[in-house]
Amino acid sequence: MSASSTYYKADMKAFTMPDLVNTSSGVGLRAIHHEDVLRERPNVGFLEVHSENFFHFDAPHFKDLMILREDYPISLHCIGLSLGSADGLDKQHVEKLKQLIEIIEPASVSEHVSWSRLSNITVPDLLPMPMIEEALEIMIQNTNDLQESLGRKILMENPSSYLAFNDCDMTEPEFLTELSLSSGCGLLLDVNNIYVSAHNLGFDAEEYLRHIPAERVAEIHLAGYQINPVDDLGDIYIDAHNNPVHDPVWDLYEKTIALIGDKPTLIEWDNDLPSLEVLVGEAHKADKIRQKYIPSDSRGDNAA
Amino acid sequence: MLHDTQQKFLEGIFSEEYPEILSSVANVGDFSPEQRFQVYQNNAKLILTDILKRLYPVVMALVGEDFFRYLAFSYIKAEPPKTCDMTFYGDSFGQFLKSFAPLKDLNYMSDVADMEWAWYKSGMAGRKTALTAEFLADITEDNIPELKFNFQPSVLLLDSTYAVDKIWQAVTDNETEQLSDIKLEQDTYLIIYCPSDKDVTFLSVDKPTYSFVKALYNGNNLNLALEQAIAIDADFIPDQHIAYFITNSMFTVNE
């Protein structure tokens, strides 16, 4: 069966792009780089932080974000809303996010197509959703409830996957499309996640891309994966964010923007972090690729 | 159905038994459902163990990294996170160590963990406007006994019947060879505080001073705090302590 018959035609909501458009590529801001970014003010288009790391407004590192928000658009990337949870939203968590948004006034707010909390227990990871109608309905409901509570639309990111469930009703691109069209959320396309999942689950990454609605994509993520050998069977790729972006992912990135157009792009690096210079260098590498696909009459001066 | 699937998935993450969820995982490609599910088990274990390693480096140095991993996983299974905000995950680690059978002969370990937790919490607490010496200019002799002080949120008090400060210092200074020289059973009174935004430190004080500070910390006035200290040491004089706390911005103004 196709989920599109259920949702696509029934309730198509408009989506407004967040204010990250026409900037040069951004980088994830992590604690180890705070002082360097404050001092050097690198030439990047925006900074993205994990919202949950800034839920305590008295914490010393919160001041750093308050200073940097004056000079950079900020993207709040959530990792703990658990929008796929059958338990619904954690109202305390949503309230904290709402307060953070009021203070930071971010250009963009995003989350993942995943879950991490059930029955008052949380796993600090992005757990996979079965691609079934019930899961889609719950995720649409939770996303709607969140957006209503925040008073703004969010972006939803495709996950990296290491397993698939039996008896699926739809593909992941179908799930993402229906989620976006029914809830009005935008999509955050993580090209590394597509590459990692395609490798692990054996699907065609380019075919996946062809089923993503380009006009709903508002941001792209890039990161480095880790190769984990499993006995003598082969390698599972882990979305570890602990390496430079791998060459095949750069290739897929270029194919992505050739297909869906230039999009604000972010380099994520969370573990085994390099110097700020190396991190920013990755963002500039993305800029060079993007430049090839930006129409000459709309090129800004801010791309590195 | 989704709730049931997620419940089984969650149980499998923290389980060492064969997870029931595997019957719902597609058997595709080169890897078995079990090998695929292990990625999620390992991720969760790794992330939470890393949090505990960052919070409790002294405990880890004392028990060794391999044992610490076992200890951490025992804690994770017993007390998995309740919220996605991991800022204060691990707060009950010291309490958990008290009842952790393999450490029953190392009673000081939970107090060392409590000191490490206080250290982290102090660094995360942030700062309010500090009380300055000018404040003292407004004080008259009549109102001194009734004075009350508010402490910075980063000021934390800790007492132990073990020399946790000396153990902490030896491990932090990489001088573990000195551990055998430390007399473990020593009454210890600590004021942990954060004099600047990011550098936590501690002050080791005697029992009368600790009683005095604790009384103030609990909202009592200067007179009562002084009475408690003098009950332990008739010669106790608070002046230098008050001056030290003001100099180090440990008091806040009423806001």
Image (spheres, rainbow, N blue to C red):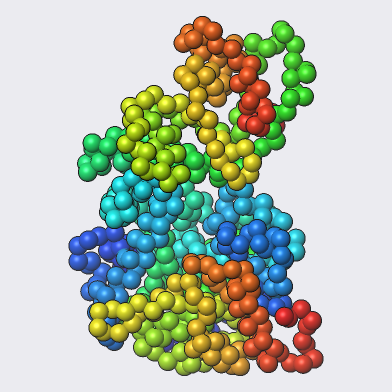
Q: Position of residue A297 (x, y in %)?
A: 80, 91
Image quarter of the C terminus of chain A: bottom right
| Residue A149 horizontal side relative to residue A85, left or right | right
As drawn, B154 above or below B41: above
Residue B244 lies in what quarter of the image?
Answer: top right
- Along the viewing direction, whichever of B216 and B26 lies nearer the viewer: B216
Q: Position of residue B220 (x, y in %)?
A: 56, 18
| Residue A247 horizontal side relative to residue B147, left or right | left
- Along the viewing direction, whichever of A144 and B126 lies nearer the viewer: B126
Q: Position of residue B69 (x, y in %)?
A: 31, 55
- Along the viewing direction, whichever of B138 and A202 lies nearer the viewer: B138
- The answer to whether residue B185 is seen in the rendering is yes
- Along the viewing direction, whichever of A39 and A54 lies nearer the viewer: A39
Q: What residue lies at 35% left-to-right and 80% top-to-bottom? A: A236
Q: What residue lies at 34% left-to-right and 68% top-to-bottom? A: B40
| Residue A26 horizontal side relative to residue A166, left or right | right
| Residue A103 horizontal side relative to residue A166, left or right | right
Q: What residue lies at 31% left-to-right and 41% top-to-bottom? A: B97
Q: What residue lies at 65% left-to-right and 58% top-to-bottom? A: A35
Q: Position of residue A32 (x, y in %)?
A: 57, 60
**Numbered disc total:** 0
Residue A53 lies in what quarter of the image?
Answer: bottom right
- The answer to whether residue B93 is seen in the rendering is no
Image quarter of the N terminus of chain A: bottom left
As drawn, B188 above or below B94: above
